[in-house]
Amino acid sequence: MTTILSADGLLEIPEAFRKADALKPGQRCDIERLGQGEYRVSVKDQNVSELEESWVDVLLACPVKDWFEPNDRCETTDDLKPIRFE
């Protein structure tokens, strides 16, 4: 089945597919690029919470690995002198 990409970059899932899979407006979808002009769309279950994806999952999905280098610490909050207000 063929559909047309809108000027806004949106694709419409054909009505026959929406009815067959009981898809509802606002339902979340994942899209994965398989190659040049080739994509896979997966519709998420309606009961899946957005909070189920942890930050660890998000960070592990990051395409750039091992970029973080911590700074050398020359002082900490333990080095601060207390301030007294009179």
Image (cartoon, helix red, strand yellow):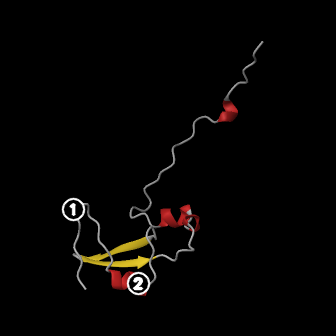
Residue 25, percent from left and from top: 43, 70
Height in image: 81 above or below 54? above
Quadrant of the image occupied by residue 85: top right
Instruction: Please provide percent x and percent y for residue 38.
Output: 26, 78
Task: Find numbered disc 1 in the image and state the secondary structure of the residue it sits on.
Answer: loop
Residue type (three-letter) at the residue carrying disc 2: Lys
What residue type is disc 1 on?
Answer: Ala
> In terms of depth relative to the viewer, which is nearer, 25 or 7?
25
In the picture provided, is 53 more to the left or to the right than 23? Answer: right
22 over 86 or under it: above or below:
below
Quadrant (top left, top right, bottom left, bottom right) of the N terminus: bottom left
- Which mark is first along the chain, 2 or 1? 1
**Residue closer to the observer: 26 or 58:** 26
From the top left corner, tell me how far across and down residue 16 is, in percent: 34, 85
Q: In which quarter of the image is residue 64?
A: bottom left
- Residue for point 56% across, 72% down: 48
Foreground residue, 67 or 24? 24
Taking depth in this image into account, of 59 and 68 the one nearest to the observer is: 59
Image point 72% across, 20% down: which residue? 83
Q: Which residue is drawn at 42% across and 72% down?
A: 29
Q: Distance between the residues labelled 1 and 2?
A: 25 Å
Q: In which quarter of the image is the C terminus?
A: top right
Q: Quadrant of residue 4?
A: bottom left
Q: Is 42 drawn above or below residue 54 in the view shown?
A: below
* Foreground label between 1 and 2: 2
Residue matched to label 1: 7
Position of residue 64 relative to residue 28, above or below, is above
Q: Which mark is residue 19?
A: 2
